[in-house]
Image (cartoon, rainbow, N blue to C red):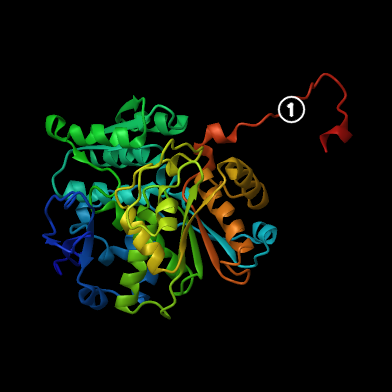
Amino acid sequence: MITTQSQRHCVSHLEAAIDGTKLPAGTIQTLHKGKPLWVRYDLDAVREAVSREDLVEREETMWRYRELLPVARDENIVSLGETMTPLIHCPRLGARLGLRKLFIKDESRLPTGSFKARGMAVAISMAKELGITRVAAPTAGNAGGAMAAYAARAGMESYVFMPSDTPLVNRYEAVLYGAKTFLIDGLINDCGRIVGEGKEPMGWFDMSTLKEPYRIEGKKTMGLELAEQMGWTLPDVILYPTGGGTGLIGMWKAFDELTQIGWLENDNKPRMYACQSSGCAPIVDAFDKGERFADPAKDPHTIASGLRVPVAVGDFMILDAVRESRGKALATDEDKLLDWMREACALEGIALCPEAAACLGVLESALAAGEISHDERIVIFNTGAAQKYIEAMQVEIPTLDHTKPIEWASLG
């Protein structure tokens, strides 16, 4: 552990997720044998450095968990004010499903309107600490805008490559934040290939999902926050919209670290449900087949752009976490996503994104199958703001002629 005042991290080393190979911290690392890395901490040092009670006096941002994050020097933190997001009880939506203890953790309140802010805040901070000045990433949704925003905050140059059918707001926000932005007539993995091929000629660092070790550390703060908000206990079930899967993987890592430092009130961990759309469900297919690695999805299509990930580099990490938790990977009908999105928004006033709508479809099916009980504590993660999905929000709105008498009965 580093103990000087400006250095407060407890990172011990990096570890290859595929075979446990240890790599040094404080150096630029990407993949090992084509697979992701874990950031490992000296958890005894964390336990000595901070207690649950210490958090009460800290600012309510994701950086309150400083000792469980990898940035060594405070001056390298790149922040846009990553507030703790609310955990909202949803009685009307719960009643629709026959539940009394349904909660939504609303990540739409974060900078750039999605959970991607968590990962990019830590990844860009570490890039700054390691002397990186140019970054690039593929995106099919919110990640590109988040990276562009944090790169702008850090004074870095950024490049974003996205499929040509990426939602309109996601396209425009990357440009607005100063990223050199390009549309690709292909899928996100085609964009990822371009980013990889450009590393040498362009001199950028590849910020793709799980191709660097630090975005997952930002995402794990969802799990740290959830535990704190629930009085250092955990729900029975977490349903998480799963594309690249860093959020689910990160939370499971967070729960393990909290257990080891003794912060949880009991050892009961949630069953993790990886939720996908029938239009793109490679993790579900691998889970059903009992496989550890997923085959690429064929003809991937879904209005939930964050779920349109035909190949996840961390597929085995997602599946390991789901199985270890005794959870499942399930897909819901693509055609029902917009119905669930609109119903949830209308019932609870929460700006639910189409990715989170997949969780509601999965939840309904799991309840009907008896896999989830109606008396369990259930948390769904709303990973982005509905306002960022203009294409999904389009509806017919009637026009009134103000020059004529209004037929009031017709307004009902």
Q: Secondary structure at mark 1?
A: loop
Q: Is residue 132 visible?
A: yes
Farthest residue in the front direction? 289
Picture residue at 44% right of the left edge, 37% below the top: 300
Total count of labels: 1
| Image spot of residue 122 (x, y percent) | 28, 52
Q: Is residue 303 above or below residue 91?
A: above
Task: Name the residue that disc number 1 marks.
Answer: 398
| Image spot of residue 81 (x, y percent) | 37, 51
- Which amino acid type is shown beneath numbered disc 1? Pro
Picture residue at 33% right of the left edge, 79% below the top: 262
Picture residue at 82% right of the left edge, 35% below the top: 411
Label 1 neighbour load within 10 Å: few <14, some 14-19, many 20+ = few
Quadrant location of residue 374?
bottom right
Q: Is residue 391 left or right of residue 405?
A: left
| Image spot of residue 397 (x, y percent) | 70, 29
